[in-house]
Amino acid sequence: MRRNRWTALRRGAIGALLALAVVPAVTLAAGGGSSAVTPGEQGQGPVNTCFWGRPAANVGPINHLNVQVGNVAGFESNVVYYYTLFQLPAGATITLHGQFPHARYFSLTSYVTKSGVTGYPATSIYDEQIEPDAGSVNPFMPGADRQAADRDYTITVSGETQPASPAPNTLYAGQAGQTGQTQQIELIMRIYRPDKNLEANAGVPLAAPTLNPSGGSPVTQEKAVCEALSTVSGIGNLPTASQGLPPATYQHLRDLGSPVHPATPTPTWERFFNQQHMLAPLYAGAGEPYESLIPKLPTTVTGGFYSTPSNAYITSYVDRNIGPNTEGHNIVVLHAKMPTHPTTYEGDPVNDSTGTQVRYWSLCTAGSISNPPLIPANSACLFDQQVPTDAADEYTIVVSLPEDRPKNATPACGVAWLDWGTAGDGQGRPSLDLLIMRNQLSSPTFAQSIERITTPGTEQEVMGAYYPTTTYETTQEFEAKGGCSTPATPAPSAAPAPAPAPAGGWFAIKQVTHNTKKGTARLGVDFTGSGKVTMTGKGIKSVDRTAGTGTGELTVVPGNSLKAKLTQAGQAKVKVTVSFETAGNVWTKTKTISLRLKK
C-alpha cells in the first residue's frame, strides 16, 4: 500500500486540490515507499453528557502524551474511550441514535466480570456491521464516501443473550441466567484515530440514548434516562481494582530474575491471550517454582483489561540498561513489514479499505501489569500512517529517550521515532517498559497476522516478515548506519490551484532546487477502477487511459501542473509517482487521488 503525507487543501469535493512536494530521497524510503503524515491536534470534545461522561482522550498534539484522565488498562493514545455503566431493567432496551464518526474505526463493546475480575469483553458491534438509517451512508464500507453528510445510524442495546440469528444493529449485552432481572451493563464506545484536527467525538454528536421500558413509554430526555438507569459514566469510573497484580507481588516476581528481568537481551514478542498468561514473562527467568508454572497458564484467547475483540496484540518488555551503553542510554530498534491498511487521517474522501490486511496498526510504550498504575501509556503511540516505509513496505522504528534520539531517527529520514518515556514500570524501575503492538480486524487472507497466533512461542514463525525484529543499540551506532543525518528542509507550499471540477484533481509540480541545481520531474501514472481518465497539463500532450489497466509516463518541467479528470462515468484512482532527477540522483514520492463521476 502506498500512503501519503500531503493534506487536501480543500475537503469535500472528489477533485480536491493536491500538491506534490519533491524532496531528496534520503528524506524518504528509497524506491517510492510511503512517508509519514504530519501530526495534528485533538480537542477534548463534549464532556457534559451524563450517559457517556468524560472520555479517555489524548488532548493536544497527537505525537505527545497529554492524557487528562483515565490513563489505565493499555491506553492507546490515538483512541478515544467513552465508558458507561447502567442498570438495565428486565425486558428493557436502550436505543442509541448517532452518526458514524470521521475516524478509522468505531465500536461498542460490552464487558462482564469473571471470578471477581472485571474487564472481560463479552459482545461487540463495530462500524461495518452497522446498517445506516434510511437515506444515510455508512462511511466505513469499502468505497464509501467518508465525508457523506447523511451518516446516521440506530443501535439497540438488549439485555438478552445473543441468539443464533441476531437482529440487525443490535448489541446483546445480557448474561445467561440473568435476563429476567435487572442487569448491570458495562459498555465502552471506541473511536480509533479521529481525522486530523477533529475533537475526540470525531466531528459528530455523541450517540443519544432512549430508554424503552418493557410495557412503558420511551424515555428520550438524556438526564431522565441516566436517572432511570442509575448511570455511572466517564472513563474515570472504570472499575479496575480487581485487575493486574498487587505492587508487592509484581515487585517480588520482577526482582527474582536478573537486574533487567523480565526484559531479555534479545527482546521477544508474545501474543496477549488473557490476563493470566501475561504472567509468563515474569515467571520466565524467575527460577522455581515459577518457571514450571508457565506451561500451566491458560492460552485461550479471552482478552481482559477491557480489551476489544477487534484487536490482537503482541507485547515485549524492554529495558534501557540492556545494550552497549553502560550508563543506561541504549535505544531499541524495530524493523518489520507494515501490514497494508486504510488511509483516513487526512480526511481522505473515499474509503480505501478494500483488500487491506488490517484496519489499524499501532505501537505503544506502556508500564507494567502492577495495579497501580496498571499498564499506563508512557508516551504517545505511533499509528500506521505515522510510520514511513520503504519500497518493500518495511519500516524502521527507534524507541529512545528524547536526549538519546539519533539525528537520523526522523520521518524525513524514513525512520519513525517513539519516545521511551521515563515512567517505566511505575514500580521503581524507570528504565523498564512494555511495548504493545496492535493488529485490528485482520483480513482472513492475512496469514501472518497476530490473530493467527494460537500457540505461545510461535509468534515469529507465524508473523514472518511482519514480526518486529528488535535489537538494542547505541545512538552512535544507529547514526553510523548512514542515511540522512539531519531532517530535510520542507519544500515551500505550492500556490493554490484553480477551483477543482467535481470529477477531477490537479497535481502541482513545484520548482525544486537541490544543491542549487534545478531538475526535471518525471511522472509515472497508474489507473485503477472504472471509466476513462484523461490527463492534461500545460505543455503536456493529452493522455487517455481506461481505468483498470492503464499506465503511462509524462515528463514536465517543475512549475507546471497536471490535471486528472474522469471523462466517462465511473470511479477510479490515479496514482502519480513523481521522480525528481538532478546531479545523477533520483528521488521519488507517490500520491494517489480518488475520482468519481456519476452517470
Image (spheres, helix red, strand yellow):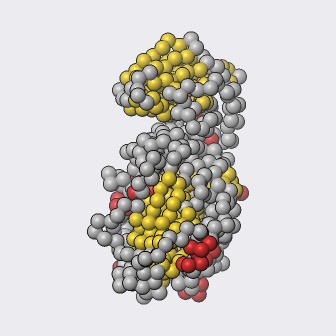
| Quarter occupied by residue 514 | top right
How many numbered circles are shown?
Answer: 0
**Quadrant location, the C terminus:** top left
Whether residue 78 is visible here, answered yes or no, is yes
Q: Position of residue 233 (x, y in %)?
A: 60, 74
| Quarter occupied by residue 16 | top right
| Location of residue 533 with respect to 13 vertically, above or below | above
The residue shown at (59%, 68%) is: 221
Q: Position of residue 464 (x, y in %)?
A: 37, 54
Q: Say left or right for 457 vs 185.
A: left
Whether residue 581 is visible here, answered yes or no, is no
Q: Position of residue 159 (x, y in %)?
A: 41, 76
Q: Say left or right for 213 vs 402.
A: left
Q: Say left or right for 205 vs 94.
A: right
The residue shown at (46%, 59%) is: 154
Q: Position of residue 392 (x, y in %)?
A: 44, 41
**Quadrant location, the N terminus:** top left
The residue shown at (46%, 20%) is: 534
